[in-house]
């Protein structure tokens, strides 16, 4: 093993413990720093909420640290302020994630606070109402955000109404207003528990002692009502392109959101698709899309592509902000780049540049406790193996031009893209058009 490989977190340097109740704890010693990072997750995301309770998991996540059996709101946040530490919790589609950092000597306090918030929250009514009000305000403002509205319309067109991804993880105004304290407490009682929970500890710590500390805090946690992790099936692919138009009054810019279902992180061709996405709309000044649509043709204020790659069927999407007069031209230019990616091998130079970019940025992402913890969590969460990073460079450089073409052809098709545009209506666009 080379000196560079010895510095990469791997099975030989990451200590892993599986508790009898189903929790996995991983610890990595990083003595070069004076701090520690706590990262973790459990299966309590928005896919577990009822359709008419959209936003429930998200509201639970934001309310966890407003009070617990042994700590009220002031005690929670006073304890963090006293040691200059951070701790936060947030629910996503599949999981509730938590994370924080502190000085090494304050790791016991950080773990203790996480335990109280995750295991014994009380959801004080006054704080839940405050959070509800804040959420409703954000949702109301978002209705005037053309980028948000375009993304929302694309998502709803891409996933049928019965699909868990059709609903907004943050909820809708009606659903947030309808959620009760009983709903929050019932969701926590059913879905929070040790099964499938991950805890990662990184920094100036003794790995064995850190694992023992986490085990002491969570090892006796039991929840017989907790259901097994819920898979989410991919919806049927669209037979033809769809286009949605959202009128947002008072706006002078239009936003475009286009997408198809991309690969989950565990897919064998995920890295090939990731390289394809980088070439399409990420590398440099947002890849080919950025160069064509923004730089060469001047049709967009921004333009880029994004590959989801989570636990389920997330979108492979393209976003752009344009003058309303240029919407159709911008869409046509984006589709041209998608056709080129799916019909023609990328150049040797494009492949080499992006392989170098991917392998070059990896060490930079491992320079902090947060970056190391995130990668260890990802390796465990997606079952990649704890030696995944050791072989990362080899994996990237084993991807060929043919692999990229096949991945692009598998997940993208210009003639079947779901397209959503949010902005001023035709009348507003006509009023803004130059007169000659």
Image: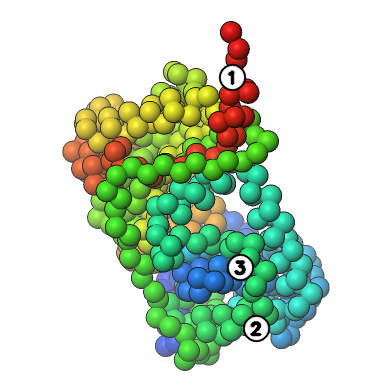
Disc 1/disc 3 C-alpha distance (Å): 39 Å
Provide the secondary structure element on which disc 1 rests: loop
Q: Residue at x 72, y 66 (%)?
A: 131
**Could you classify mark 1 by the number of other residues whose Cα lies within 10 Å: few (under 14), some (14-19), or many (20 or more)?**
few
Disc 1/disc 2 C-alpha distance (Å): 53 Å
Instruction: Looking at the image, tell me whether mark 1 or mark 2 is earlier in sequence order.
Output: 2
From the image, tell me which residue sits under label 3: 175
* Quarter residue 380 falls in: bottom left
Figure check: 122 above or below 359: below
Judging depth in this view, the residue of 206 and 275 nearest the camera is 275
Q: Hey, which residue is sitting farthest top in the picture? A: 436
Instruction: Looking at the image, tell me whether mark 1 or mark 3 is earlier in sequence order.
Output: 3
From the image, tell me which residue sits under label 1: 433
Judging depth in this view, the residue of 403 and 218 nearest the camera is 403
Instruction: Looking at the image, tell me whether mark 3 or mark 2 is earlier in sequence order.
Output: 3
* Quarter residue 277 falls in: top left
Q: Residue at x 54, y 62 (%)?
A: 169
Mark closer to the observer (3, 2): 3
Q: Position of residue 335 (x, y in %)?
A: 35, 32
* Residue 400 seen in render: no
Q: Position of residue 394 (x, y in %)?
A: 26, 46
Q: Position of residue 261 (x, y in %)?
A: 34, 52
**47 displayed left or right of 238:** right
Which numbered disc covers residue 67? none
**Could you classify mark 3 by the number of other residues whose Cα lies within 10 Å: few (under 14), some (14-19), or many (20 or more)?**
some
Q: Residue at x 49, y 25 (%)?
A: 326
């Amino acid at each position: 093993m080379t000196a560079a490989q010895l510095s990469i977190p791997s099975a030989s340097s990451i200590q892993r413990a599986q508790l009898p109740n189903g929790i996995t704890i991983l610890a990595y010693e990083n003595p070069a720093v004076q701090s520690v990072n706590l990262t973790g997750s459990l299966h309590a995301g928005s896919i577990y909420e009822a359709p008419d309770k959209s936003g429930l998991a998200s509201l639970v996540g934001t309310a966890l640290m407003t009070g617990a059996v042994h700590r009220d709101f002031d005690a929670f946040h006073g304890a963090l302020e006293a040691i200059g530490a951070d701790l936060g919790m947030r629910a996503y589609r599949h999981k509730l994630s938590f994370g924080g950092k502190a000085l090494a000597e304050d790791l016991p306090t950080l773990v203790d606070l996480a335990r109280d918030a995750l295991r014994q929250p009380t959801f004080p009514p006054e704080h839940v109402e405050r959070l509800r009000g804040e959420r409703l305000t954000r949702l109301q403002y978002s209705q005037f955000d053309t980028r948000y509205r375009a993304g929302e319309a694309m998502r709803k067109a891409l996933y049928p109404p019965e699909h868990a991804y059709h609903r907004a993880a943050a909820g809708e105004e009606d659903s947030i207003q309808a959620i009760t304290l009983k709903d929050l407490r019932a969701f926590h009682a059913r879905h929070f528990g040790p099964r499938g929970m991950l805890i990662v500890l990184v920094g100036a710590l003794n790995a064995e002692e850190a694992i023992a500390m986490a085990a002491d805090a969570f090892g006796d946690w039991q929840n017989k009502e907790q259901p097994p992790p819920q898979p989410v099936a991919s919806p049927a692919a669209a037979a033809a392109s769809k286009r949605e138009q959202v009128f947002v009054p008072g706006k002078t810019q239009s936003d475009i959101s286009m997408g198809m279902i991309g690969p989950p992180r565990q897919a064998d061709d995920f890295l090939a698709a990731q390289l394809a996405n980088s070439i399409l709309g990420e590398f440099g000044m947002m890849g080919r899309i950025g160069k064509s649509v923004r730089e060469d043709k001047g049709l967009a204020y921004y333009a880029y592509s994004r590959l989801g790659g989570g636990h389920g069927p997330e979108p492979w999407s393209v976003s752009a902000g344009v003058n309303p007069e240029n919407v159709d031209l911008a869409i046509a230019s984006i589709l041209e780049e998608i056709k080129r990616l799916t019909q023609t091998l990328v150049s040797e130079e494009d492949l080499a540049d992006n392989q170098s970019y991917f392998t070059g940025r990896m060490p930079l992402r491992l320079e902090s406790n947060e970056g190391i913890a995130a990668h260890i969590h990802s390796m465990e969460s997606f079952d990649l193996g704890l030696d995944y990073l050791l072989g990362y460079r080899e994996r990237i450089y084993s991807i060929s031009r043919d692999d990229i073409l096949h991945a692009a052809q598998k997940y993208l098709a210009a003639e079947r893209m779901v397209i959503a545009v949010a902005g001023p209506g035709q009348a507003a666009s006509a009023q803004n058009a130059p007169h000659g």
